[in-house]
Amino acid sequence: RLHPAALEGYGVGIEQVIQTLAAENLTLPGGTVQEGAEELLLRTTGEFRSVEEIGEVNIMTPTGVPIKVKDLGTVTDTYSEADQVAYLNGRPAVGLLIQKQTGANTARVGQSIKRELENLRSLHQELEYTYILDQSEFIELSLASMTKNALGGALLAVLILLLFLRNFRSTLVIAIVIPISIISTFILVHFAGLTLNLMTLGGMALGVGMLVDNAIVVLENIFRLREEGKSPLEAARLGAAEVAMAVTASTLTTVAVFLPIVYVEGMITEIFKQLALTVTFSLLASLVVSLTLTPLLSSRLLVVEVNNNNHGKGGILKRYSHLFGQKLEQLDNAYGRALSWCLGNRKRVLGTAVVLFILSLVLVPFVGAEFLPATDEGRLSIAVRLPVGSTLEATEAVAERVARTAAGLPQVQDVYYTIGGSGGMGMDGSGGMGGGPEQATIDITLVPAGQRELSTAEVAEELRKLFRDIPGAEITVAAQSMIMVGSGGAVNIVIKGDDLELLEELSENIVAVIENIPGVRDPDTSLREGRPELQVRPRRQRLAALGLTTGQVANAIDTALQGRVATRLRVAGEEIEIRVRLAGDQTRQDLERLVLTSPLGMKLTLADVADFVYDVSPRSIYREDQVRLVTVTADISGRDLGSVMGDIQSRVARIPLPEGYFIEYGGEYEEMASAFGGLALAGVLGVVLVYAIMAAQFESLLHPFTIMFSVPFAITGAVLGLFVTGRTLNVTSAISGVMLAGIVVNNAIVLVDYINTLRGRGLTLETAVVTAGRTRLRPILMTTLTTILAMFPLALGIGEGAELQAPLATVVMCGLTVSTLLTLFIVPTIYTIVDGFSFRPRFSIRKLFSRAKASN
């Protein structure tokens, strides 16, 4: 570091010092010399071997007097000046961000990194580290939670079967079928190139409740025939054949609603394609197993007491079985009487159903809307911004206060913060902000969710209140998630136009309008103040007269402030840069006295050839389609995105826009609107496919119409479920709504198919409807309850990553519950109304089964 006073006193310039050091630090070959009989290589070695040698280099002054470099300044072996500092829990730290390659498995990469760090710790006992962001840990915990929920759902489903069938061997048949179907699903998942993740395991958890439905229908029918006295082999053969068409059609209708979801464009395809494929694989596997393995196991394992004649004699299980059998018989009789009443009061029944459906639609505005439910991952990111031009030290003081305040909360585990540069440990590795000494990023890791009472969003809200007392800085707090949606924050408003000043005014008006809307947090614009700067404006005529150029002046200034590498010092196999620069922080007065040497040897100062002017650096200007734009962003808290955006749009619409200026809404809202539009189309296509499949099965266009009446009541249940639980309408709940169109018709298919079977045997319309309803009541209740209880652990939303699956499970549970209850009465009633009309398609699944049976 050269002292300006010493340079001025001796009349030596920085360039002379740099050139001398470069010339002295050389090693050059010089050919060969003869030494007796040997020929020796000749090399001049003048490289510096130590820092002290650099200080001893002589510099010639204009008067011809040599002086040493150390007389002009100080020679120090040190580090370059830091433009960014990082701390972890108040201690200096180094942040390391590791990103996996495209296509690599995050969990496996995380495990490999942890092993390597443990190896390093064994070699360096003083090494301390912690994980500020570990996606692999969250993924592993989420998968474990999802697996636990799936196993819990499967256990509940088996218990329901034991409760209804009252027969351990019958339950054993289903217990064997479940793992075989799951294993078959995993095989299909593997060959489809899918991995175990939240979506595939979520699809598996969803499929656990449905994959037993086919087996239940087949088993219950065989069980009923065995109770009627048929032999095991005959009951297995007739029972499976009697419901084969129904279970095939019910499976195909459920699969059909997933096909359009796979082909919907946008982010939802990437997220939910694997879930849809997993559920499809599980249903197809269960269909094959139910029509093959279930009858086989039933013929070998099923033991039924014909007509149940022991009247509860025996142990407690026998008495329980007899008692529950009586209750089921009472339920059958009560349902039969209620169904007969419905058939005699069809207008009242339909009127009540329509009123319930309309009332449920009234609740829709009270159900919030968002793109994806927030996940409680226990990570927060705090952005601190001081006025433009603030020093690194000033920013560090504010960031330290913010970090200390955050660390005082009992929910906080680790606090990692960086000042200057772009060192945040966010998903993009930049902390969501650019470089600059006036900016800091603070990443907070909370204790595990089970060890704290507040959610991540609630902790963020608490921190916002605490930071209001910190003056002189803009502080924003945001919860972090692995699933990044859109660009900017939850709210993203783009103003487009030509005049930058007018765009700035409009953006400030929008910020002022939306900042008081409930739920809006930290509104901000993309426009930033220009950094203050000191411009050096050379006097060109003066420079030309002295033989200098603007480039030489700029290089002299850059060398004085930033320094220039004159040469390198090689020590122990390493190269260390020798950087020459002025010592200390330079002021304007120091720059004005900076010595320049003209080609004629004249010594003059920078003030002699340039003027100094204070100004502001230009702003960053963003364009899209060659049109300037400014973006207003904000986060939300305490309210759903749909209601917040509704308030924002209504208020922003009151702001008058000049001609040629317009506003667009992006971010999560844009993704949500696009996803809902795609899912609406997928829902319509799914309903059409379901209708077509049922029309082919029943050889009628009216019976499918009857069955489709169960779909609106599924919507009723879904809306009620979301309203009661306080969950929102989002992509996961919307997808489950599409799924319901294929799920809820299954019970109606089984019911209508058996009504048609009884009608074919000669029973009258009302007798066939009532008899079919009573006969199919038990399998309908069993399949419904197994699906609902399999979803119950997911619907609780407990565990890492469960927030994504909870709305889906809630919609399926509540929609299926209400739809089933109403289907048991509405579908038979509609059936009696439309009976007598006959529109038959040429293609028939029934004919395919008949031909296959005849060929066998």
Image: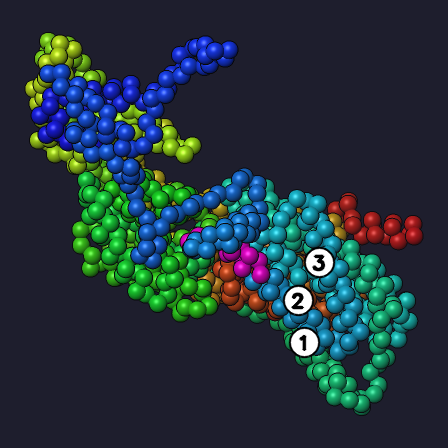
Q: Main secondary structure of the magenta part?
A: helix
Dot 2: element: helix
Q: Which residue is mark 2?
A: 154
Q: Closest to the observer: 681 or 579?
A: 579
Q: Which residue is mark 3?
A: 182
Q: From mark 2 to mark 3, how far is it between C-alphas?
A: 11 Å
Dot 3: element: helix
Q: Residues within 10 Å of mark 2 (few under 14, many from 20)?
A: many
Magenta stretch in the rendered image: 132-144
Q: Is residue 346 left or right of residue 760?
A: left
Q: Residues within 10 Å of mark 3 (few under 14, many from 20)?
A: many
Q: From mark 1 to mark 3, how far is it between C-alphas?
A: 35 Å
Sequence-wise, the earlier of marks 1 and 2 is 2
* Residue depicted at x 24% and y 20%: 20
Q: Is residue 825 above or below residue 90?
A: below
For the residue marked with disc 2, what is the amino acid? Ala
* Residue depicted at x 84% and y 86%: 309
Return the x and y of residue 276 as percentages of the image width and height.
62, 50
Q: From mark 1 to mark 2, how far is it between C-alphas?
A: 28 Å
Q: Is residue 136 magenta?
A: yes
For the residue marked with disc 1, what is the amino acid? Tyr
* Residue depicted at x 43% and y 45%: 97
Q: Is residue 520 left or right of residue 204?
A: left
* Residue depicted at x 29% and y 26%: 565
